[in-house]
Image: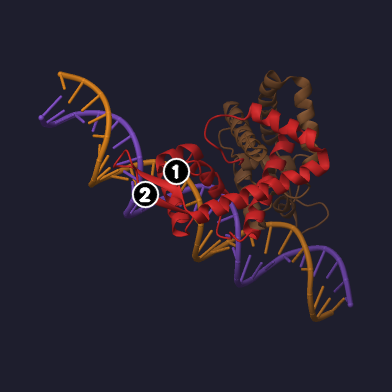
Chain colours: A brown, B red, C orange, D purple
Amino acid sequence: MALSAALLAVAGDLTQRIHDGVVARGFADIRPAHGFAFARLAPGGATVTELAAHLGVTKQAASQLVDEIVRRGYAERRPHPEDARARLVVLTEQGWACTRAAEASAAEVVGAWVELLGEGEVRALRERLTRIAPYGPIRPAW
Amino acid sequence: MALSAALLAVAGDLTQRIHDGVVARGFADIRPAHGFAFARLAPGGATVTELAAHLGVTKQAASQLVDEIVRRGYAERRPHPEDARARLVVLTEQGWACTRAAEASAAEVVGAWVELLGEGEVRALRERLTRIAPYGPIRPAW
DNA sequence: CTATATGGTCAAGCTGCTTGACCAGTTCGT
DNA sequence: ACGAACTGGTCAAGCAGCTTGACCATATAG
């Protein structure tokens, strides 16, 4: 099997399994794309424009995505402390809970890989992938 | 950086770069999803239903995707030799050319990884990813 | 203090998927 | 052998998530 094919197959499967795990933990109204938004919002919030840049989509699309997660109680819009034009989107407690669920779910999948490859190999995998990971916006795998 | 985040970032970047390379080689009317269809069609053709199962979408969606690549000259529908209900979708010469372009493009990206990690590490990466790659349908990474 | 740039939203439109209905042809049960 | 049920494929309608374009409010530069 070719490296690129294996990588894409594993990535797709990973996404699916994380999502399944998140749903199984009680967060049924969440799409995989939301997870990438949560990751950007988690540290201390972000503006819609920052989120758009991170996700590689237009501001309008990011704004719409924020609408969804706000409507469902995962985040809220607050006035930005330094710029009256901007609004800071921050996770609610439910948003944090969902983020933790996603992390637990991801850890579960990685745990299955440890079963197959052993801990050392998985660590090596992580180290190598980290070294070739790009900096720019997150891009959908297709 | 977490393993799962690195993997998804690398996968998204890989998809984007392969696609860019395919476009640069003169195949501008192709989406990343088409590549996964080509991979299934390449050996000796496939039916719409087989393609749908491979891509994890409905028959209708697969049929529509086949419409596109047929309209653009990458494949053609032939009567199925063993089942008069079915139609065998096979790549045209242009479809093969595009497939080769995608392979060359992928090889280019992997070449960049070899620059970063060395040949042995990349081989090890391939071997490990192959071992954890799933069997089922290909799934979008999000 | 005007002129331009930036953050955000509203509105309309498109693309790629879904569900539902249906026909042609194959396979199964008796 | 023959009707019932299943399977491959298409047509049609609808929807979700994105895009482009226009616009307002605030900030920054000359």
Task: Residue B139: name its quadrant.
Answer: top right
Of residues A13 and A22, which is closer to you in this image? Answer: A13
> Where is the C terminus of chain B found, in terms of image quarters?
top right
**Residue drawn at (40%, 40%), measured in percent from left and top?**
B49
Residue A132 horizontal side relative to residue B97, left or right: right
Residue B76 shows in the view: yes
Residue A38 shows in the view: no
Residue B45 is marked as: 1
- In space, the residues marked 2 and 1 are separated at their CA atoms by 10 Å
Where is residue B59 shown, x and y percent of the image? 41, 42
Q: Chain of mark 2?
A: B
> Where is the N terminus of chain B found, in terms of image quarters?
top right
Q: Chain of mark 1?
A: B
What amino acid type is highlighted by mark number 2? Answer: Arg
**Residue drawn at (30%, 42%), measured in percent from left and top?**
B85
Residue B74 horizontal side relative to residue A9, left or right: left
